[in-house]
Image: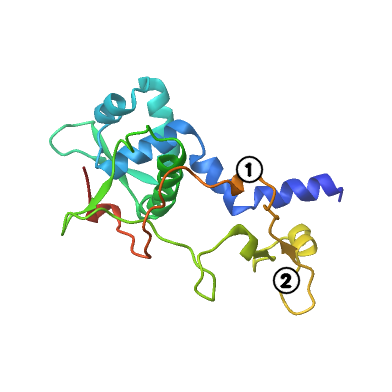
Amino acid sequence: MPKERRARIANEVCSVARAMDAIGDRWSILLLREAYYGVKRFDDFERYVGLASNILSARLKKLTEAGIMTRVRLPEHAGRYEYVLTDKGRDFFPVYLALKKWGDDWLAEPAGPQVIFNDRENGQEIVYPDFRTAGGKSLRLEDIEVVAGPGAVSFNRHRFGSGSKGAVTKPAANLNSSPARLRKDRPSVEKSSALARPANIRKR
């Protein structure tokens, strides 16, 4: 099989590629944002996202077909539905938080972010999780090694190895000279491993 075809197959089964196929566009992310804010009805999605109804219908249908939302009939309104997050959709919330944090750190207005999340029980601001190495240090890109996972196709097994002793592995990119190494002007945000699910947060 040609290398290009094997590379395409590897991308077709890549979890990241599949995730991007399910929700990897601006409008789908904004619809999930509103769902995490508690929005469920079509008219409210239309109002808060500012999306044309035909595009909104298509995006909600895609999220529903992907199992990220489900349509629930409203008993008091025949033929009308709410769009409710499934467990699969709720499990995307930490990913959304990571995206929001990156946007707040690098792209927010000078005065700060538009929305923060508070804990419903004590009113304190939710802090973002900190990924750590096996040794307990804050994780940097330079700390990781890419190895083939248990479901890897042959292309990725050959490219990354198995991770066992003596296997060929792929170290992370060296960022010593990359612009990504530049420090942000904003003060660092206190981090912890605590992370609330959408049901336990409130906006402020």
Q: What kind of residue is marked 1?
A: Pro
Judging from the image, the colouring scheme is rainbow
Q: Where is residue 47 in the image (x, y as percent from the top left)?
A: 27, 24
Choose top left, top right, bottom left or bottom right for residue 179. Answer: top right
Q: Position of residue 81 (x, y in %)?
A: 25, 35
Could you tell whether 42 is left or right of 137 in the image?
A: left
Could you tell whether 150 is left or right of 56 in the image?
A: right
Pointer 1 or 2: first along the chain: 2
What is the number of the mark on residue 162? 2
- The nearer-to-camera label among 1 and 2 is 1
Can I make out residue 71 in this image? no
Of helix, strand and loop, which one carries label 1? Answer: helix
Q: What kind of residue is marked 2?
A: Ser
Residue annotated with mark 1: 179
Could you tell whether 5 is left or right of 177 in the image?
A: right
Q: Which of 60 and 140 is in front in this view?
A: 140
Can I make out residue 158 in this image? yes
Residues under numbered marks 1 and 2 in contact, where contact means CB atoms less than 8 Å apart: no
Choose top left, top right, bottom left or bottom right for residue 108. Answer: top left
